[in-house]
Each structure stands twice: as structure tokens, then as C-alpha cells.
Amino acid sequence: MSFRHVPVGLLLISGVLAAQTAEKPKIPVNYDEAQVGTYTLPDPLTFPDGAKVRNPKDWYEKRRPQILKLFEDNMHGHSPGRPAAMQFDVFEKNGSAFDGKAIRRQITILFTGDKNGPKADLLLYLPAAAKSPVPVLLNLSFSANSRTVDDPGVKPGEVWNREHKRVPAAQGMAIGRVTRVRDLLDAGFGFATIYYGDIEPDFAGGAQYGIRDAYLKPGQTEPGPSDWGAIGAWAWGLSRAMDYLETDPGVDSKRVAILGISRLGKTVLWAGAQDTRFAMVIASCSGEGGAALSRRNYGETVKNLNINFGYQFAGNYQKFGDHVDELPVDSNMLLSLIAP
């Protein structure tokens, strides 16, 4: 069974776009085709010296690493690898959910191995009738697990409110509720979800409260110009969730897809570009900084992101708001990194 056999309707998520419309852009966006202008995209299959990629070895051993580094240096920053001390606390292993259709697992990922340190809760459902490991859809959510899925057995979580405080999830908005988990289970798929705010808060200055704080160098109070932004941190968290899924006997870890919407659509694209263990990337409404072409002056722009959401990217990305043509990468190159 593969993900292409699941109707798109099964992936419907409600309320996500409300998270984006609450923040008004400070500079205009362009929705006039007449103002798009002309542009030339950088070619993923051309080396800096003009030579062409001729075969898979050229791509995987030479060109792909070049492109990945360009994104790290200029857009998303450099992320660390798997923490040596990371631990998984499986505090529920065989819970029953959805009228017995699912086995529910709940896992706290202790990023540094410290129960009092940075951590995130991962929620996983597996079809109870499955006789072998199943493919899994891993969702990156705007809400805590207890507000993402309608299941009273899920541990009550916490979310960040508009005052930048952690509060019980029941006091926050249920943004990005997943309503079709039963259908996925009936089709033979597992479903997992993780709250992005557990990994890193979504506001300027949030690095001190998230996973990036654990990686600041002595004397640093904020990430450096080529260090990871919040999107890099959220993508890193998805890879840590994948680290757990590889250990779960009920999961076919070769068939894990990741799903995200809007800024989390940008995130899953970057996660899939970096981590080749993900079999599929489902990025909805990812916009500028995601699947939209930066050089095409339409919709959101790099300058818009720089002004409104600069903390989501590496500091070096700020250089290109007024000089998009000098950005050495574009979304066609990002998508090329996800190609099989």
C-alpha cells in the first residue's frame, strides 16, 4: 500500500489558515500578474563552473550537497544532528482509541535526555488490525496533540498564547484539527502528530525558550547569521520524531510521509530536503520560502518574510529582501532536494 491510494480528502485539516491571517503583513504583496516581471531561475543541474550534472552519482555525491549548503548558508541556517543523549519516554504503549480501531502510543522526546530540558510529545496511532508494520502520516501541528485529535485519552498539552506564555491547550485555539484519523486507520495507515510549539515557539525572540537555546555557543544570546531559524528548528524536531518512528515495531519507517500547512508547509519541505528518510512530503499552502518561486514577484515576497517573520530563517536571509535575484537558490532547487 502506498500514500497515493489515499484520497486527498482524507488529509483534510480545519482551521489552519486562521493562524496566518491574524498577522497582517507590514509591506504590500503583489497579486497583479502585470507586475510579475521577468526572471531566470538557477539551474539545479548545473555546477557553479558551468558543467552539467550527467548522472545520479554527480547529483547525489556532488551537486545535491552543494545546493543543500547554499540553503543552509543563505536561508535556513545550519542545524545540528541527532543529540547523543536524546531519549524516548514511551509513557503509553498500547492504549486503545477510536472504538478499538487504533493502538495509541504517546511518547515524550527528551531532546537532551533531561526530563526538565527541551522536549516534545509525539502522538502515534496504529491500526489495531494490522498484521505487519504500516506506513505513517506524520503531521506537524499548530496545536497541542490533545487539541489536534478528538480523543479524550490524549495527554492534555500546553500551547503558546498571544502573550508568549505557555498555557493549557484547552485555553488556546484548536487550530489545525485533524478530523479524518479513522479513515486513515481504515485504509491501513498510521497517524502521528507533534506540536511545533513544543520544539520552538513561533515568535521573535523565541529561541531562548526552544531547542535552539540548547545549542547557543558560550556568550551567545541569539543564533548567529548562519545558524538555524525557527523553521530549521521545527524541521529538526520532525527528524527527531522520525528517530523514534524508526524504533517502533508497528511502523514501516521506509514509508513515512510528513504533512504541514502554511509556515509548517515550508517546514516539511525543508525537513524533506535535509532528511532523506522521509518517503513523501505533503506541503500545503507553503508560499514564499516554500514551494513558491522567490524570483517571481507574485504574492508574498522575501522582503515580506524578512520583515514579518525574520526569526523563522537564518539571519543571512535578510540580505536578499531587496536583491532576490542575488539569492543563490530558489524553490525549484528546494524541490530538487526532495526528489528520490
Image (cartoon, rainbow, N blue to C red):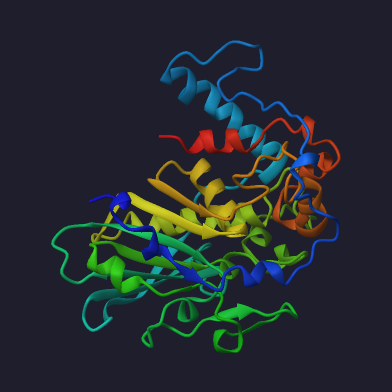
Residue pushed farthest front?
34
Q: Position of residue 284 (x, y in %)?
A: 53, 55
| The C terminus lies in quadrant | top left
Front one among 314 and 291: 291
Q: Position of residue 201 (x, y in %)?
A: 66, 68
Please tell me which residue is depicted at 45% across the width and 63% down the height of the picture: 139
Q: Is residue 278 visible?
A: no
Please tell me which residue is depicted at 66% across the width and 12% down the height of the picture: 49
Q: Position of residue 170 (x, y in %)?
A: 55, 88
248 over 37 or under it: above or below? below
Please tell me which residue is depicted at 85% across the width and 61% down the height of the picture: 26
Please tell me which residue is depicted at 24% across the width and 61% down the height of the picture: 250
| Badge count | 0
Locate residue 86 relative to residue 94 in the image: left or right.
Answer: right
Residue pushed farthest left?
131
Q: Position of residue 102 (x, y in %)?
A: 25, 75
69 over 166 or under it: above or below? above
Front one among 34 and 192: 34
Q: Quadrant of residue 91?
A: bottom left
Q: Is residue 33 visible?
A: yes
312 over 276 or under it: above or below? below
